[in-house]
Image (cartoon, grey):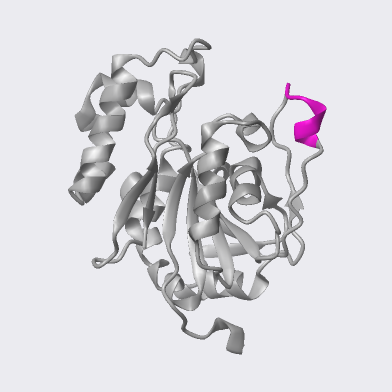
Amino acid sequence: MNQLKNTMRMPAMFIGHGNPMNAITENPYRDAWLALGKSLPKPNAILCVSAHWQTQGTQVCATSNPKTIHDFGGFPKELFAQQYPAPGAPEYAKMVCDLLPANTITSTLDWGLDHGAWTILQSLFPKADIPVFQLSLDVNLTFNQHFRLAKQLASLRERGVMIIGSGNIVHNLARLNMQGNTPDWAVNFDAYIKHALMSDDELALLTIANAGEAAALAVPTDEHFLPLLYIAAVKHDDDNMQFILDSFDLGSLSMRSVIYQ
């Protein structure tokens, strides 16, 4: 397993993916992903934590040929036709299982790359030549438990694994605004998280109820927020942090994205 040897530390990043159509239309988010991809080192593998894979117990997908999953409805045929034929990374998936106590993470072949993964990866790495595998979000874990689990994955970055979280800090589909007007509660919660990230305030990230009503509206369900916790957990003390994007889409989707490298 020489390919799993130590290597230069890979970046870790959280990407706000928003509307799946961002992947195939001309928009500032796709432009930013394309530009970011050109600046990134080429990893041995990519571990993606997506808002769109929730399971009972934490799972890692170990298939050699992950399928492109079109887990949405009501979009044009062009979006359903998209394929991201990257290879899988079964040896790295085994490494993830081995990093934690036995049975903490279980391996499965029954997944692939959902739209939280491939819609951003096809802009970051359009050649689809880097092995990719996904880690699920256990619906039974608290914020603190997710964060503690993720911390144990930090060493992957020294093994050539780029870790990407995909979700949205503010994600309220019931409050979408087609004119793009962003309500105060969304702006306020995004600012709360921005400050927590800039000040390295883990407690603020883990106790978002302290942001008041804004938190309840910005995070009505936790799956789009949780991938940010995984990225915050795997940062190193000497990482440089940079915001890649900081705007809103459709009013109630924060596209704020952050990279540690």
208 to the left or right of 76: left
Would residue 196 be visible to someone looking at this image? yes
Q: Splitting the image into 4 quarters, where does residue 1 fall?
A: bottom right
Q: Is residue 43 above or below residue 139?
A: below
Q: Is residue 140 visible?
A: no
Residue for point 42% across, 67% down: 153
Of 2 and 134, nearer the camera is: 2
Q: Quarter of the image for the C terminus: give it.
A: bottom left
Q: Nearer the viewer, residue 92 or 100?
A: 92
| Image height of 100 relative to 80, above or below | below
Q: Residue 98 vs residue 119: left or right? A: left
Task: List x then y, in percent, for residue 94.
Answer: 59, 73
What residue is shown at x 43% (from left), y 48% (from top)? 14
Q: Report the magenta residues as a range.
A: 74-80
Magenta stretch holds residue 76: yes
Percent from the top left, x then y, of residue 175?
Answer: 46, 14
